[in-house]
Image (tube, grey):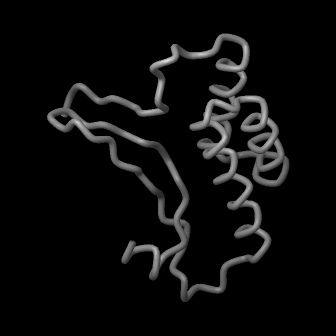
């Protein structure tokens, strides 16, 4: 949480690395909190984060809507594109009941 005091972050994934049993949340740094960051971007990042929450809660229809809205303003965002594609996929063919939105890495 210390890093959140100094930087604006956004979620990338929930990952479980080789040799560990508990997943960790992975974030990307958007910018330093001291930077004059575009307020509109901060508002849209909240839309992105809500999309992540819906995706992890298996609400793929709402996740799809939120990522689509985000991409209207930031069409080149690769993370939002990836989550939109996955939401569309899972909306059509839901993952297994045991799915927990964790990316498992078996190699270092």
Horizontal side, residue 90 vs residue 101: left or right = right
Q: Nearer the viewer, residue 106 or 51?
A: 51
Quarter of the image that includes the N terminus: bottom left
Out of 55 and 76, give the one closest to the viewer: 55
Q: Residue furthest top?
A: 93
- Asked if residue 104 is positioned above or below residue 40 in the image, the reply reads above
Residue pictured at 14% horizontal, 34% vertical: 19
For this orientation, the residue located farthest to the left is: 19
Up the image or down, 85 lies above or below 69; here it is above
**Based on the displayed image, in which of its 4 quarters is residue 73 positioned?**
bottom right
Above or below — where is 89 with respect to 24?
Answer: above
From the viewer's perspective, is residue 33 above or below residue 67? below
Where residue 87 appears, as percent x and y from the top left, is 68, 28
Q: Residue at x 65, y 86 (%)?
A: 36
Residue 94: give x, y in percent of width and height.
63, 15
Please tell me which residue lies in front, 78 or 18. 18
Nearer the observer, 48 or 60: 60
Q: Is residue 84 left or right of residue 8?
A: right
Q: Residue at x 19, y 34 (%)?
A: 108
Report the residue at 46% width, 81% height from top: 5
């Amino acid at each position: 949480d210390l890093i959140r005091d100094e930087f604006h972050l956004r979620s990338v994934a929930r990952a479980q690395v080789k040799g560990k049993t508990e997943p960790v949340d992975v974030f990307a740094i958007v910018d330093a909190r001291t930077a004059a960051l575009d307020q509109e971007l901060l508002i849209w990042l909240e839309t992105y984060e809500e999309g992540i929450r819906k995706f992890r809660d298996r609400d793929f229809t709402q996740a799809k809507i939120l990522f689509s809205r985000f991409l209207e303003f930031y069409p080149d965002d690769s993370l939002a594109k990836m989550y939109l594609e996955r939401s569309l996929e899972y909306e059509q063919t839901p993952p297994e009941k045991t799915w927990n939105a964790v990316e498992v890495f078996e190699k270092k």
